[in-house]
Image (cartoon, rainbow, N blue to C red):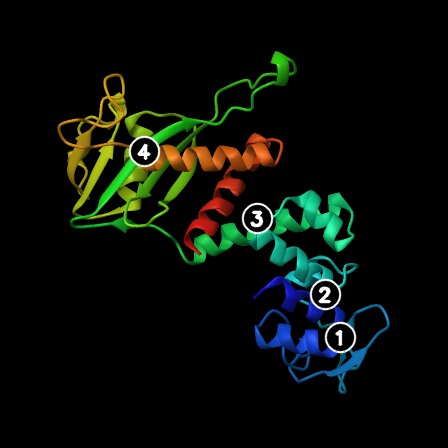
Amino acid sequence: MDLNLIIDLERGPRAYLIRWLQMRHLLANPLSCARCNCAMEMKERNDDHIDGRCSGCKKRRSLRANSFFGEFPKVSLGAILRVIFSFTQDDSQRRMAENVNLNRNLVSHICRTLQDFCSMDLQYRPVIPFGGAGAVVKCDESKFNHKAKYNRGRRPARDTWVFGIITAEYSPARGYFTVVDRRDADTLWPIIDQCILPGSEVQTDDWGAYRGLTRLANVQRHRVVVHARNFVDPRTGVHTQEVESCWSQLKLGLKRRKGIRRKDLQSYLDEMMWRQWR
């Protein structure tokens, strides 16, 4: 799918756009009556909507019912499709609003809903566990506090930490990222055990919570780099640079979005994981 196709769909006959969406199971086909369980007859309206009408009970139902498009009944199908495409391309919300000629707050609402879909997709099709016999995974934590500009404004009441586990099997690296309240072994070990397959080699820095990781059933080997001495261990070659690269990309994305509220951070991480893996 490319931008030219999206524009053609948006500007072309409405019936063609609807059929295109139905073929991809983004709209119902056919639309069934919830009461009679029979196919409804389609009736066009003038406001970019098509309703189904049951010949038996005469009940009406929007073609958008139970679809993503139904969340935004006042926005045209073509405009929503363009926002979805722009979201997949990681365009800024300002650019989306300008290109589609929609209110910035409305675009932000659509993007937050798309983030929720990313989170749901990760639940239905989990990216974990990964690793396994002969595979290397790398773990690290990073602080994601919002910095006050010019040292002004309210500072966070507590630090916000994100724990990450990445697999070195892909380039660029892919991983699993989650907000954590603490960085101790009681918090991190269950996450590691859940995220990796048996036989994995785990590489970390020398943070105390990682000591004794081989006691976990799925950890075959644990190797450490002491960052106070070297970023890459000169003897073993162990490093966590792939994780550091992921942190840089995640924080760059936050900077582009002018920061984010702590309660929305996990949704952002879910979106970034979805982009890495899908």
Residue 120 in the image: x percent, y percent? 50, 54
Quarter of the image with the N terminus is bottom right
Point out the frontmost of discs 2 and 3.
3
Which residue is painted at 69% across and 74% down in the image?
A: 17
**95 or 20, nearer to the observer:** 95
Rounded to the nearest whole Å, what is the CA distance between mark 4 and mark 2?
A: 43 Å
Residue identified by numbered label 3: 90
270 vs 24, left or right, is left
Residues marked 1 and 2 touching at CB (< 8 Å): yes
Farthest right residue in view:
46
C-alpha gap between disc 3 and disc 1? 27 Å
Task: Using the numbered discs, state the Cα–Cα distance from disc 1 to disc 2 in whole angstroms.
Answer: 9 Å
Does dot 1 land on a helix, a strand or a loop? helix
Q: Nearer the viewer, mark 1 or mark 4?
A: 4
**Number of the label disc, if any, that sits on residue 241:** 4
Can you identify the residue that label 2 sits on? 77
Secondary structure found at label 2 = helix
Q: Answer with mark 2 or mark 3, whichever residue precedes in sequence.
A: 2
Residues at marks 1 and 4, CA–CA distance in whole angstroms? 50 Å
Q: Residues within 10 Å of mark 2 (few under 14, many from 20)?
A: many
* Image x and y of residue 105, in percent: 74, 43
Q: Which amino acid, by three-letter code, is at mark 4?
A: Gln
Contact (CB < 8 A) between labels 3 and 4? no
User: Of label 1 and label 2, which has the lower sequence position?
Assistant: 1
> Pointer 1: what residue?
14
Q: Count neighbours of disc 4 (C-alpha within 10 A) and say few if under 14, some if 14 to 19, many if 20 or more.
A: few
**Badge 3 amino acid:** Asp
| Residue at x 48%, y 21% (from the top left corner) | 159
Q: Secondary structure at mark 3?
A: loop
Q: Is residue 179 above or below residue 231?
A: below
